[in-house]
Amino acid sequence: MVALPGSVVAARETGIHARSGGFVSAWNVDMAETVTADQLLAVIDAPEMKRKLDQTLDAPTVPAEP
């Protein structure tokens, strides 16, 4: 086996934009660290989204008509 110097560059880049406001409350991996499929990378707290979810879950339900 012969090792040669080099670098790998992505052919395309994709921007990532948040759909709602929030903040990262925990990082579970560091940059350049190897990760596995389905591994949790970070925890995001979104207080406004949680408030809306709580309101929705607390709302009375309307029975469906037969």
Image (tube, helix red, strand yellow):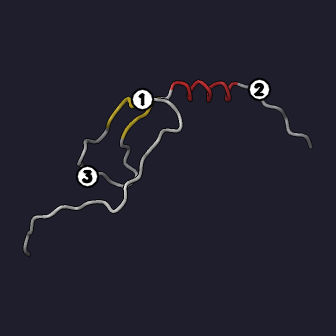
Q: Are marks 3 and 1 in contact (CB under 8 Å)?
A: no
Q: In the figure, 51 relative to 9: above or below?
A: above
Q: Is residue 9 left or right of residue 14?
A: left
Distance in Å between CA atoms under marks 3 and 1: 23 Å
x and y, in percent, of residue 25 in the image: 38, 29
Q: How many neighbours does mark 2 have within 10 angstroms: few (below 14), some (14-19), or many (20 or more)?
A: few
Residue at x 83% of width, y 32% of height? 62
Does label 2 or label 1 sit earlier along the sequence? 1
Numbered mark located on residue 60 in the image: 2
Distance in Å between CA atoms under marks 2 and 1: 30 Å
Residue at x 10% of width, y 64% of height? 5
Q: Is mark 2 on a helix, strand or loop?
A: loop
x and y, in percent, of residue 50 in the image: 56, 27
Does label 3 or label 2 sit earlier along the sequence? 3
Q: Is mark 3 on a helix, strand or loop?
A: loop
Q: What element carries label 1?
A: strand
Q: Is residue 23 left or right of residue 66?
A: left
Amino acid type, mark 2:
Pro
Location of residue 9 by image quarter:
bottom left
Numbered mark located on residue 34 in the image: 3
> Disc 1 marks which residue?
23
Q: In the figure, 21 relative to 17: above or below?
A: above
